[in-house]
Amino acid sequence: MSAVIEEHHDHHDHKPTGIGRWLFSTNHKDIGTMYLWFSFLMFFIGGTLALVIRAELFEPGLQFVEPEFFNQMTTLHGLIMVFGVIMPAFVGLANWMVPMMIGAPDMALPRMNNWSFWLLPGAFGILIASLIMSIMGMGSAPNFGWTFYAPLSTTYGPASTDYFIFSVHLMGISSIMGSINIIATIMNMRAPGMTYMKMPIFVWTWFITAYLLIAVMPVLAGAVTMMLTDRNFGTSFFNAAGGGDPVMFQHIFWFFGHPEVYIMILPSFGIISEIVPTFARKKIFGYSSMVYATASIAFLSFIVWAHHMFTTGMPVAGELFFMYATMLIAVPTGVKVFNWVSTMWKGSMTFETPMLFAIAFIFLFTIGGFTGLMLCITPADFQYHDTYFVVAHFHYVLVTGAAFGIMAGVYFWLPKWTGNMYDETLGKWHFWTSVISVNVLFFPMHFVGLAGMPRRIPDYSLQFAEFNAMASVGAFAFGFCQLIFLYNVIKTARGKTSVKATGQVWEGAHGLEWTLPSPAPFHSFTTPPQVK
Amino acid sequence: MSTSNHDEYYIPEPSKWPLVGTIALTTTVIGAVNTIHAGELSMILPVGLLLVAYLFFGWFSAVIDESMAGQYNAQVDRSFRIGMLWFIFSEVMFFAAFFGALFYARVFAMEWLGGASNNASTHEYLWPAFEAVWPVLTNPDNSLFVAPEEKMGAWGLPAWNTAVLLTSSVTVTIAHHALRAGHRKPLIIWLAATVALGVIFLILQVEEYAHAYSEMGLTLDSGIYGSTFFMLTGFHGFHVTMGTTMLLVMLIRSMKGHFTADKHFAFEAVAWYWHFVDVVWLGLFIFVYWL
């Protein structure tokens, strides 16, 4: 039943074998691997939906899909990318790296860890089944946008909405258990001498992210529960005829939704904060200010939600409060950006693939941040609201921000996970094709958005044609160059690359995870390391 | 805090329970939706619920066996405590969503439907007859949502229920003190009293619901007052049911001789949960029944 870990290093590798190794796993690395592959699979599914959208938008008029199906594409693309790609990828990285970084043998609650993972295939199985049924002509998949505003999702939602609601419940349970596990691990499993202010920044950002998740995922569960009863049991939370308010849905949703967008970026901040010092061969500039900035961003995320709803007719006092509170976020975020740049200042820099992605992250995420500042100015937002400008903004922070952070992290840690160096040439190809195509994809959206092109519409006015064609070309290019990434990862994992990784992997790497051999032993630290 | 007990890390062996849990929950939710859509029981639902019961029974049995075999060191115990604490916090946030809905409906939505702030013309053109008075006894569209006839008073059954729950918090604490002092008999007696109070609370709550439905017209579909009332008290009642069940398990384990004076995390976790349920009730009593 139990396994008290042997003290000798030569005993550490009796791995369970066969399919049971994965189904019944209590190992943080195996569970992390499953999270990452799940995320990768969802990335290609969600990406395919995005390509359907971009194919339809390549030129004005209706070409490939019905407007009704187009709505299902935007909805499921958003849901899959948010809940199925970015979040599981971060949890996968946390699973792999947090125990190694703090000098622990595993996560604090290994069985719950596995449950957190396995709920995701259940949840997404339900969600994707509704899409498959829609393609087969049996009803509609969710079609109200990933924000599922009432009354689109309550009064007018298709029958599959109820499956969607429970699918969100399962994702929520998964996220909450995952977060509790990460918090318990960080609070309880740190090696002797690893004080909080000595923890790697990646651990810090995940620690704070986990608190955000525990605070807001239950609120999302409450929101979808009220949707369920409004739809099926006659309550009137979001129906003004019974004294409720559809705008209340937006408030509750965004009380979850705004911290959620920081849940999707803070761990990337952590990854970048590990990579930049490694390849600049300097310590991170302003460690403690990085920690405090992360905490400040997390706190502010709870008091800015209504900046997503400026056009709903809020009282002016509310609009002003949420505008100014939102602007404040630029301060701690600026602290982080300046710290990354200062870390590179006079560093002895090399530009391996993780560093290239990290630098692209800093530059392109900052563009997304600036457009965010533009959006938070209430009167200006009346023009930008629900246009492609918003789409451009959040794809800069989520694709070139969150997703680039994840890709950087994968290249950075893949040698540690597999014991093999990835193919640097392919990595560079992946980076340069991605960074060019992603800008061809999203940058023109700023222009059509400012000119007034609305989002979530399958057809558009003729004057938007050139920029949309450009974006669609960029989209297909970006989509297909991710296959280089896939190939490179598989090649490295299967050991087909020529170079074996050393324990330290990178010349400038510091921290407990780099003191382990590559690949890291099945249970990371069997005896606790002493941190000075 | 992270300096002791590092010499023997504990990692459980591979376990089937997480997978059982996934199958159980996925089956249950599919069954639930099919039942709602068909308007009659889909057989998938009871299968799912049985699997959930099997999951709880099996997983907790495994954990209890491991605990009784002395496999959990102080570090594992701390992980469990941290886990339970933050689980309860997540529950607090779940209730916060419904309290938030109640406050928003009372403070903003109702007033705005009544024409407050910049909503004078909305009021004038949509539902000019609507008056912003809580509880809402005439809904904006009273033909679509028939409002209840009266408010659920605070000082009848709800006040008794408050007394019952507060008393149960005291009895569970007395039981805990008895456990810590190693007195088995008072532990069992006071724990049994706590379970009994939990059951009494639930019986009174059923009584109140029957009264609301049959005599007051206060139902789940009677507009925002009924919606918030039943959502909040209903989820609280569900949590009391869970808490009472957990207390019952603790009672059975106490009678079987489980727990020692200094090792009884399961008991403490249930006691925390019970106090949490109690505190939520106080919020309900003040904001749903009283004010």
Image: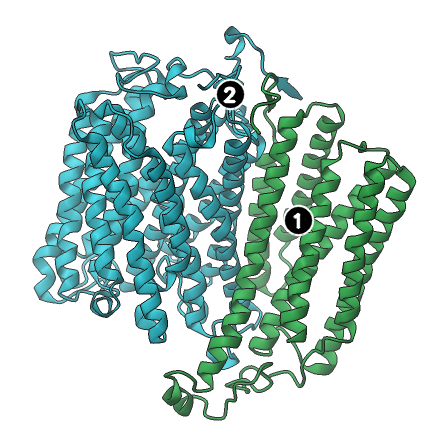
> B257 or B125, which lies in front?
B257
Counting from the top left corner in percent of width and height, residue B13 is at 61, 23
Mark number, residue B49:
1
> A272 or B37, which lies in front?
A272
Q: Secondary structure at mark 2?
A: loop
Chain label for disc 1: B
Q: Quadrant of the N terminus of chain A?
A: top right
Whether residue B165 appears in this view of the structure is: yes
Whole-number angstrom distance, CA of label 2 to CA of label 1: 30 Å
Colour representing chain B:
green
Which residue appears at 52% of the width and 85% of the height? B132
Chain label for disc 2: A
Discs 2, 1: same chain: no
Residue tagged by mark 2? A18
Q: Is residue B220 left or right of residue A386?
A: right
Q: Please determine whether, in this image, residue B203 is positioned above or below residue A468.
A: below
Colour representing chain A:
cyan
**Label 1 near label 2: C-beta < 8 Å?**
no
